[in-house]
Image (cartoon, grey):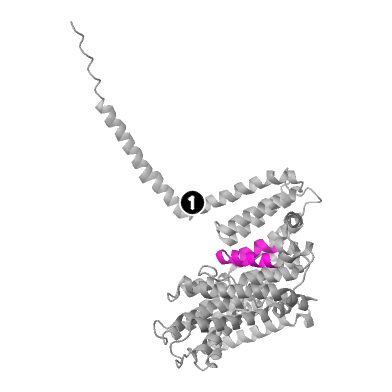
Amino acid sequence: MPTLPTPPKLPNLRKIARERRIQRIGRVLYQRVLLRSGRQVAKRLHLDSRNVLLFLLAVVLAGVTIPLLEPTGLPREAILMASIFVIASLLWVTEALPLFATAIVIIGLQVVLLANPGEWAALGFEDGPTPDYRTFLEPLADPIIVLFFGGFVLAKGATKQNIDLALAGIILRVFRGRPELVMLGLMLVTAVFSMWMSNTATTAMMITLVVPMLQQVPKGDPLRKGLLLSVPLAANIGGMGTPIASPPNAVAVGFLQSAGYEVSFLDWMLMAVPLMMALLAVTWVLLRRLFPPANENLHLAPEEQEITSWGWFVVVVFVVTIGLWLSEAWHGLPTAVVAMVPAIAFTATAMLKQHDINGLEWNILILIAGGIALGRGMQLTGLDVALVESLPMTAVLVLPVLIVATLLLSTFMSNTAAANLLLPIGVSFAVALPGPGAVVVGVCIALAASVSMALPVSTPPNAIAYAQGDLETNDFIRIGAMVGVIAITLIVLFGNPIVSFWMT
């Protein structure tokens, strides 16, 4: 008999159904429990996967730096400092962490790796005694931090009593409403205030003064853009004027002091204010050409503000403090000591209360401290000297290369972070090579950081003006790029002779 074929094996429907049910339960468990829970945890912890990856990448690169540099013969402390510099560079450039958080990371790593308070193996200094951990905490109480704190207190007192708006209105009325003169007045007032208070706060204040004027200008009139652009541009340029005008200035002064170079408040103003005034004039001319008013007979009038009795008290303290800062050579009080005058005057009289002090920009103070700590760590470990010896750069190229690098970096990232990274390298080059001195390079890098404003995201003042809705990115590129190129040209050509004249 023929053999019948074996019937095909029927699938076990129950088993298949059970497996599919298990898979479905697994998907539900993943989607509704694990994934949702993970997102909720990430949301609660404010985690950003991109930033976490960048932070981990910075740590990995820092770890790779150590074995790569060991064959070079550098001492252990210089290699450890190089790894800290790698972490700081990547975190500041990418902003994977808030800028002030990176500053805290720098100080913390210096304490653990370089001071080595736990006396762990393979850490601390190899050449010479290991510094005490307090050495790496000193930048948090550096005199430049106290100076900047005094500037913040002055600014807080002025804004609380509306001194800024009142004085701005008084000054603008002098220009009698003519559009081009009102624009000039806006720029002068903004620049002057930016010399003594945060350029971000100055821009926010001046924009509130400009908005009522914009209501007097017809839609589509180029003057609207000109008035709006004049405020952030003047605020950025005004950030050159004094050591407390912008964080890069404070970092430069603090780092130069730690390197043994003293730059007084008056010295800085004598070096920076002429360039600031020249750039203001150039910027005003460019704004008039690029954004002329459609109606030359238009009359612009600022709103009036009254100064209260508390306001006059703030004005007196303001004048006394600035006078003491500028006359340090006669009375001998350091600028950091003078910075305590407004702090004492405003808090002892309860003009500034606890919530006012809590509202100061403490993150900026920590960021400045981080920059000073980074430079000081490179000096203590000898990494700055090793870096200078390893890079092929002639004395002629030091200043222009660093200034252009500062301008480019500051256009796309925080100008304070850019100054923090380039100042230790630049000053070390200047000390090791003939040519421009350390003070020349330090001051010029800080000034170049203030003129990087070719994009809405380049500086907070640009972002505030852009948020008003009348400006486009191309507007910032047109005027910001031209001002930036003119500024770095002036700094390269006249920075060395001006600084050398006043510092010799």
Q: Residue at x 35, y 38 (%)?
A: 26
Is residue 198 visible in this depiction of the protein? Answer: no
| Extreme residue toward the top, this view | 1
Residue carrying label 1: 49
Magenta span of residues: 400-423
Quarter of image, res 329: bottom right
Is 303 left or right of 112, judged from the image as shown? left
Q: Camera-side residue: 117 or 34? A: 34
In this figure, what is the number of numbered marks?
A: 1
Relative to 326, is 17 above or below? above
Q: Is residue 168 magenta?
A: no
Q: Camera-side residue: 12 or 117? A: 12
Is 359 left or right of 40, judged from the image as shown? right
Magenta segment's dominant SS is: helix
Amino acid marked by disc 1: Ser
Q: Is residue 419 magenta?
A: yes
Relative to 345, is 435 above or below? above
Is 304 left or right of 147, judged from the image as shown? left
